[in-house]
Image (cartoon, rainbow, N blue to C red):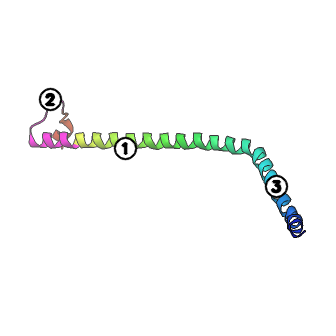
Amino acid sequence: MRNWFLLLATLPLLSGCVVGTIAKTAVDVVTLPVKVASAGVDAVTTSQKEADEKRGRQLRKQEEERGKLYREAQLRCHKGRPLATDDCTPMSQR
């Protein structure tokens, strides 16, 4: 008798959990396509942003290398030991 009373007392709690779980699952199933679509858009946006940042880094690195080579050429021209590929005309105009 006592066991039946405990079982009957806990039955509404169990049914509430089951109903809550079913409701949550239903909401998850309904919102899943929206979440997947938005994740896809974020992935495309992020990868494009990362590609742009990578290209910017490459361009800055190329500019730094050009500047370094230019400064080395200026130094060689100033010392009077230019290479055949060095353009020393800007140095002689000063």
Question: Extreme top residue here?
Answer: 84
Alpha carbon separation for disc pair 2 and 3: 84 Å
**Which quarter of the figure has residue 75?**
top left
Q: Main secondary structure of the magenta part?
A: helix
93 to the left or right of 9: left
Q: Secondary structure at mark 1?
A: helix
Q: Which residue is mark 1?
A: 60
In this view, the residue in front, 60 or 77, is: 60
From the viewer's perspective, is the residue at label 1 or at label 2 nearer? 1
91 to the left or right of 54: left
Q: Position of residue 15 (x, y in %)?
A: 85, 58
Q: Amino acid at mark 1?
A: Arg
**Residue bounds of the magenta highlight:** 71-85
Q: Position of residue 47 (x, y in %)?
A: 53, 40
Mark linked to residue 18 = 3
Q: Which residue is mark 2?
A: 84
Question: Extreme bottom residue here?
Answer: 2
Are the residues at dot 1 and dot 3 in contact (C-beta closer than 8 Å)? no
**Which quarter of the figure has residue 39?**
top right
Alpha carbon separation for disc pair 1 and 3: 59 Å
- Quadrant assignment for the N terminus: bottom right
In this view, the residue in front, 5 or 67, is: 5
Q: Amino acid at mark 3?
A: Val
Q: Categorize mark 1 by other alpha carbons within 10 Å: few (<14), some (14-19), many (20+).
A: few
Depicted 82 relative to depicted 8: above or below: above
Q: Position of residue 74 (x, y in %)?
A: 18, 42
